[in-house]
Amino acid sequence: MKTEVFIAGGGVGGLTLAVKLARRGVHVVIAEQLSKESNAYKGELIQPKTLAILERLGVLDHIEENGHPIDQLRFQEVHRNHGELPQEINLTELNYSRVASNYDHALMVPHEKTKEILRNKGKSYEEYFHYLPGTRFLGFENGMAKVKRKKETFHIQAQVYIGAEGRSSPTRDAMNVQVERKDYNHHFLTVTIPRPEDFTKGKIITTTSCFLGLFPLPDNEVRTVFLIKAGEYKTIKEKGLEYLYQAYSELEPELSAGVRSIKDWKKVQLMIPYTYHVDRYYTGSLAIIGDAAHTVHPMAGEGMNLAIQDADVLGELLAWCKEENKRYIDHLHYYEDVRRPRVSFLLTLSHLSALVYSFQYEWWRKFRMLAVQRIYDDDQLHVKQMLNISGLGRWDFNLLDRAIQGSMLPARKKKVSDRKQQQYLFSEAEDYPWKRNEKGMIT
Ligand SMILES: Cc1cc2nc3c(=O)[nH]c(=O)nc-3n(C[C@H](O)[C@H](O)[C@H](O)COP(=O)(O)OP(=O)(O)OC[C@H]3O[C@@H](n4cnc5c(N)ncnc54)[C@H](O)[C@@H]3O)c2cc1C
């Protein structure tokens, strides 16, 4: 079999890339090892930059119809009282609308639904989009991709080979890049449960020792994420589901009925956070995107977004190469030039967010509470935080910001104007720099 671009892995990254290419008349073959939907929980929070990308792919309306909007991130600190209602000691609400963009919210969409919408879009370009379910990519042989479907093994020849296989990536192995994994002192239990209809706002509820993240989904469901110490899963399981029922009910009484719908530990997924970032995104005619290239701590809800944003830049580059009659392999460096620094930045941001919830001391909780509240009180911190996690731009925190956040200096009174912010939003020339002509204009 022959194609222009071969993609190993039909997750959100691989599918976005394939749709983008097929739309622009580039022939793609995607090999996806699964033959049907997966039950494993994966990313559901779609950030504003990703919404912009999905809009350009022509699927945003469908995604919005299947999503629950999140316009704020709310951080609630409580005292947990056994058998009684929790007592709120602080609530901070950070707003996506502080970012000067039309994309003023994030969206919770069931992961498999996002994939289904992308797959269906791809299939509408039947001449160019070739999706092979139940087909496992094994590695390279004689300069071609070797794949296996049922008992049959065959080769696919392409001009470029993209690894979008997620955390375990034969393409990455073939590139021989460095992967250094970092682990955390905590794990998460995650489960989707029913929610009351009016429970529409997401929040993170914390005490000195507990963390419960709640992110409403459509159809009156809510995705929950409960932090445990690393290695504690077995002990918690032995305590029985009653342990979870009690913790959830004491932290968020509105979900005490919903949590009791969990009847089996099989519904509860253990999520072990870790991070890595490869040193190279491409070698010769091979490139990797998404979790194959980097894995991020889930605290800031970025993993899926980084995969889709990688796919957008790489897809635009490959489509441009075809349209301009340029050799793909001569231009792959642009993909790494744009994406690697942005991913590094978000990896650090997510890591810092994870540290904020990694220590169980009262003094640490007080520091966290003040630091989060300061983000709200100081408009520049608020704008920077939301702009950075939205993916729409990048505005680095400096020493002054950190001193204000750490309450060493007072919060600034001045609001950040939209005009000022616009300098930090990614322009088309920054997203796709290879399109600039000698005058620096996008062609
Ligand atoms: C529990 C959990 C919660 C998360 N929550 C969030 C969140 O809220 N927000 C967020 O943005 N991110 C979140 N993430 C991270 C996010 O899911 C991933 O970063 C994202 O799915 C990466 O996309 P990807 O396309 O690179 O890889 P994947 O989604 O892993 O897709 C890889 C695909 O390749 C296929 N594959 C693998 N090997 C082969 C092979 N050899 N041959 C053929 N096919 C192959 C797999 O079956 C899969 O379909 C979460 C992850 C987990 C596990």
Image: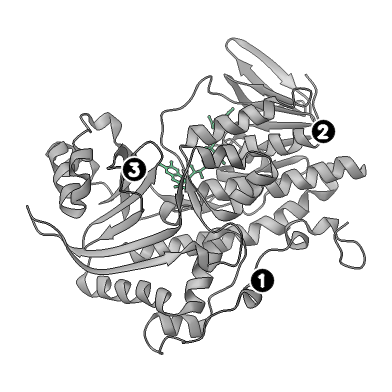
Residue 176, percent from left and from top: 64, 43
Q: Quadrant of the N terminus?
A: top right
- Disc 1 marks a residue whose amino acid type is Gln
Cα–Cα gap, marks 3 and 2: 39 Å
**Mark 2, residue position:** 25
252, 329: nearer the viewer: 252
Q: In this rendering, would 323 be left or right of 210?
A: right
- Disc 3 marks a residue whose amino acid type is Val
Q: Quadrant of the C terminus?
A: bottom right
- Disc 2 marks a residue whose amino acid type is Gly
Q: Residue at x 41, y 36 (%)?
A: 41
Above or below residue 227? Residue 345 is below
- Going from N to C along the chain, the mark reached first, 1 or 3, is 3
Residue 222 badge: 3
337, 315: nearer the viewer: 315
Cα–Cα gap, marks 1 and 2: 33 Å
Q: Residue at x 86, y 60 (%)?
A: 436
Q: Residue at x 61, y 45 (%)?
A: 308
Residue 338 badge: none
**Mark 1, residue position:** 422
Q: Seen from this angle, which residue lies furthest top? A: 151
Mark 2 surroundings within 10 Å by alpha-carbon count, few (fewer than 14), some (14 through 19), many (20 or more) = some
